[in-house]
Image (spheres, rainbow, N blue to C red):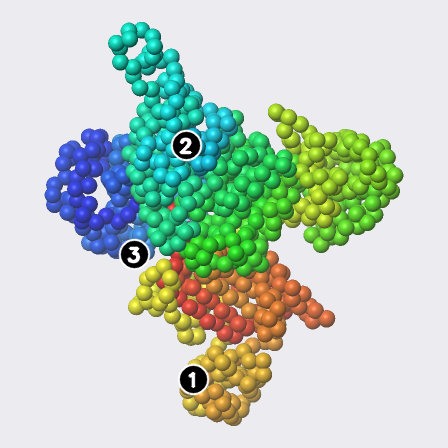
Amino acid sequence: MLASDGGVVHLRPIVPGDADRVVRFHAGLSERTRYMRYFGPTPTLPPREVVRMTTVDHKTRVAIVAVLGGEIIAIGIYEGLAADGKPESAEVAFVVADEHQGRGLGPILLEHLAGAAAENGFTRFEAEVLSENPNMVAVFRDAGYQITRAFDGATVHVEFLIDPTEALMSVRNARERASEARSVANLLRPASVAVIGASADPKKVGNALLDNIIAGGFTGPVFPVNGPAHRGGDADAESQPGAAAHGAGPGHHGPGHPGLGHHGHGNPRRPVRERPPSVRGIRAYESVRDIPDPVDLAVVAVPAAVVDTVLDDCLVKGVRTLVIVSSGFGESGEAGLESERRLVEQVREHGMRLVGPNALGVANNDPEIALNATLAPRIPAAGRVGFFCQSGALGIAILDTAARRQIGLSTFVSAGNRADVSGNDLLQYWDSDTATDVVLLYLESFGNPRKFSRIAQRVSRTKPIVAVKSGKGAMTAVRAARSAGARLDDRIAQMVLEQAGVIQVDTIPELFDCATIFAYQPLPRGPRTQVIGNSSVIASLAADTARTGGLEVIGTVDLGAGASEEEFESAVAAAMVDDGVDAVIVVFVPPVAVDADWHARALMAAANTPGGVPKPIVTTFLAVEGIPPGLMRPGPHGLPERGSIPSYGSPERAAAALANAWQYARWRSAPEPTFARPAGTDAEAARMFVREHMDGLTDGQSGEGGRDLTEVEAATLLGWYGIDVVEFREVRTMHEASAAARELGFPVAVKATSPGWRGRLDREGARLDLPDPTSVVTAFAELIELTGDPVLHVQKMAPKGVGTVVTMRDDPSFGPLISFGLSGSTFDLLGDRAYRAVPLSDRDAADLVAAPRSAPLLDGYRGEQPIDKEALIDLLLRISTLVDDIPEIREVVCDPILVSPDAVAALSARIRIGPVPSRKDAGPRRLS
């Protein structure tokens, strides 16, 4: 769990073994803090109270402790008030160590206590607070709860409902965003850096790291660490006389410091003091513990076997963040994976954040920081693009490509094995980072897909996010296994990323193609695009790609091979002031090998034509990639700034980048989606129903132990969310079949119930449109003999309509996903399904209905009447709300759902329930 200052705090239930820790915690509290908590002087806790605090049943009484470095720093507890005649209420209280007050631990404890109380059936918290303790009342109010207060002399009685509301979730998410952004700021904006495993050997990793930090001009002190325990095979030590510290800071002495002896001068009998060891002329230390000044960031380059020792030293020193470039952890096998788990556990228990292991490093181009703690020999200059990737080896190539294409970076993080800090953390940071306008992601997997979707949707409202999702072979076997078998279906990935406003591309060149236009050009206000050039063939290629990408090509202007500078400038300037043009593609091929600077002058002059609205221009300038010198608008330090015109290696790439910009602009300009709860739902009844049917199922991260509800149970559960399955009866005899048909009303259908006979193309498993009892009895006898099913269904006939199917499955990569398509084997074989992540907004549901290639069949194909789309969208929103409310619902299949102009009728529903494999993002905040 992250505190408001970005530090990690470990939360867990209290146990009887915490008794001594509780006593020490209480003894460390100030007199005022004890008074505020216990309403009187309480210098020591009576043994009976200690036992009572540490012995809870985890239902009617729950206590949670916040632990740092093995010691308790905060305690929160609730106790049910059933004895006072309030079975739905519990009294809540918490206390935080004085030195940790102001870190937001009170709201964190309250959030987790409320989550536990809700799971145990409580709906309300009460608290008694001293009138002179307004901060405690503020904790309840600022957490987003609607509190009521009653004053009774010296105390205030506070009550509030703990059910999650929209306001409460908004406050929770804001706290999460601030704390995660702060934790990344601690990583990217350190005041000092220690390089553990620093070396003078140019073949060693530690040498490259230290060299890059120094050469990058880091503004704070750098401390090389290279004691015997840290050398291993990756580092070496060097002793040089006259070593000076890099950067400023007390205790870093240069050669002339009076504390150092000067050999050959003064009294010859005076002993010569040995000069301290150094690496690359910088004072080195045996251990990070020996560094006299604070260390914010430790960059670790030692063998994996030595990392435990290094970690112990960092924990004692109070290092806040770690970057571990060492390999030999989760990517190397099960033993390495177990070492990685232990590493993360220890790091978090001591309040630290970790990038890696197996990371390339981190960089921050802010001149006030100037940090290049990476292994990359070349990083791009300062710019306004933030970049996150997982692969270290690929990261070097990516950084080199970005530098060649003049894409300036604000910050860069290569997370390696992504054991702790992830892309979600960086998105939280970049959301509020004023130095970052564009976000680039290279992803191998999603650690917390629902959280990623939620954060990305918010960030994309102001900053474009471009992502490459790596292919199936990108992850090692061990890494893929750890990701719960998550080999992503690229088509599903694209749909879910699109839902969050993320632009997904397939290759690194496409990633930078998009980055260039987003970094230097305005977004198009519409799809209307004009292609201008001196080659009709090249212009045609650009126009075709533009149309494929969703742009509307309103015309091409062929200036001819011999077009002059004035003709180019005039044509482009006319497009820039034309209200009917939203974007311009300029293709240029020199007819002979001549200096083409005049073309660049023409483009830059036309781009600045007064009187027009800002609109993007892309070009193919001699097949140059990036920002050619002639198309650059120089900013500070001679680097390109907004208004520079990007050039692409081919007309297709130029048009594709512009099309991606339009797709993003269209998404961003649409009204923000709403998540209104459908009317007529009974979440509490549904939760109780699922809990009753969960009895006996095993808990576990694998999700094993689930069970399928019967169709009657599934229909009952859906009914609490306003989803009515067409009425049916289970029958076992001819008499029951006949009676059921009379009760339901004719015509009816008689159906087999076994999976092998349901949904067959030849419909042999069903008898439809039965008009009377005789036909029902006959159909029953035929199906019993044909299928051998002991139970059949008699169902009222639904209105004729188009068959559709809606499913929800808990995907290991993206969490709960809802899919929609037309029902039938043909559509299954074609894979014509659309996917969106839960929860669905109103816009998501509408997009889901329109997304399948066969969706025109719903709009009145070949003279048919269009179906009732609003009713279909409402059904999708109800299913989304159901699975969002009750995460134990692991799978829903409604097949078929008949949709007609007047109705939506679900004929069948199957639901599977089971233990929740992960409740990330569904309850109180926690680190993965």
Residue 664 place in picture, x, y as percent? 63, 46
Identify the secondary structure beneath mark 3. loop
Q: From the viewer's perspective, is 906 left or right of 338?
A: right
Per the rendering, the mark at residue 120 is 3
Residue 824 place in picture, x, y as percent? 59, 74
In the image, what residue occupies the spot 34% across and 49% down?
339
Q: What residue type is labelled 2?
A: Ser
User: Foreground: 680 or 911?
Assistant: 911
C-alpha separation, residue under disc 3 versus residue under disc 1: 38 Å
> Which of the two marks, 3 or 1, is nearer to us in this view?
1
- Classify 10 Å Cα crowding around label 1: few (below 14), some (14-19), many (20 and above): some
In the image, what residue occupies the spot 52% across and 37% down?
376
| Residue 680 in view of the camera | no
In the image, what residue occupies the spot 72% across and 49% down?
652
C-alpha separation, residue under disc 3 versus residue under disc 2: 56 Å
C-alpha separation, residue under disc 2 versus residue under disc 1: 76 Å
Q: In this view, does 260 lie above or below 30?
A: above
Marks 2 and 1, the one that precedes in the sequence: 2
Instruction: Read off the residue under disc 1.
Output: 791
User: Foreground: 40 or 160?
Assistant: 40
